[in-house]
Image: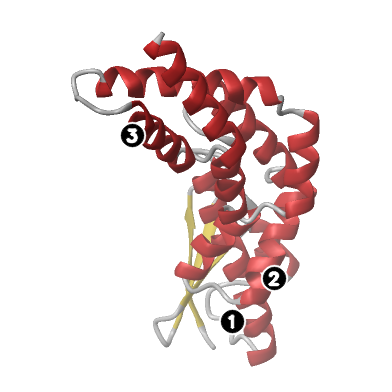
Amino acid sequence: MLIKSIIRIKNKIRISFDDDTFLILNENSIIEYNLYKGLNLPDELFDKLNNESRFLTASNYAFRLLSLRNYTKKELTDKLKKKEYEEPVILRVLNYLEEKNYINDEIFAEKFLESKIRQSKTGQLKIKSQLIKKGIELKIIERLFRTILKEEDFEITAINLAQKKIKMLKSKPLQEKVKMHKIYNFLLGKGFSMELSYKTAVSVVNKKEE
């Protein structure tokens, strides 16, 4: 592989070869391997630099994503796979980000839980399902549920949502049992437990009917 050109692009270096391929490297690699225009690069060194280039571009992509919002390890993995990065490159990027604490699934889950509690729109089961979908380990979820979540937080949320729902049903000539069933199913759909959904539905309907 013959190096055709070496061009600086911001803080990165683009090395183009005579077969129209190119690598993106940092300045340290240029210095370490004494790369210059006209150098005929051995295949073994090219492969090594290609791995470095893939790691660098994958890392830059991950940093761009993280500059917009926080991601879990699984979410970043899925994003990098869509960009067709190889598994060893993805693992190296994730390890680097974890070592530097740019990604931390436990901190992500904690902030996610706190946000959901403040929003007061969903129940425990839905929040748990969302965290599992994001790739958070079950042991982390269960530990955070024990330390952060309080049953009364969800009782208040369930009551508030049920009260809004019963107001919507006010204009409809429905029997008490029908209203109760609708509110019960509504709360289940919001991710509340069967027990809390039933207890809340009974409480809100009976209070309204008094």
176 and 25: which is toward the camera:
176
Q: Is residue 21 visible?
A: yes
Q: Earlier in the sequence, mark 2 or mark 3?
A: 2
Residue 178, numbered circle:
3
CA distance for labels 1 and 2: 9 Å
As helix, strand or loop, the secondary structure at mark 3 comes to helix
Q: Read off the residue under disc 1.
A: 39
The one of 116 and 34 positioned closer to us in this rendering: 116
Q: Residue at x 45, y 12 (%)?
A: 207
For label 3, count other residues whose C-alpha is less than 10 Å away and answer few (under 14), some (14-19) or many (20+).
few
First in sequence: mark 3 or mark 1? 1
Quadrant (top left/top right/bottom left/bottom right) for the N terminus = bottom right
First of labels 1, 2 by sequence position: 2
Q: How many marks?
A: 3
Amino acid under disc 2: Asn
Q: Are marks 3 and 1 in contact (CB under 8 Å)?
A: no
Residue name at image x 51 percent, y 20 percent? 203
Q: Secondary structure at mark 2?
A: loop
Q: CA distance from mark 2 to mark 3?
A: 79 Å
Looking at the image, do the residues carrying marks 2 and 3 touch, with CB atoms under 8 Å apart? no
The residue closer to the viewer here, 204 or 115, is 204
**Which numbered disc, 2 or 3, marks the residue closer to the eye?**
3
Amino acid type at image mark 3: Val
Local packing at callout 1 (Cα closer than 10 Å; few below 14, some 14-19, many 20+) is some
Picture coordinates of residue 50 (x, y %)? 60, 77
- Marks 1 & 2, CB-CB < 8 Å contact: yes
Residue 174: percent from left, percent from top: 25, 28
Asked whether 135 or 60 is in front, the reply is: 135
Q: Position of residue 34 (x, y in %)?
A: 69, 70
Residue 34 is labelled as: 2
Residue 120 visible to an observer of this rendering: no
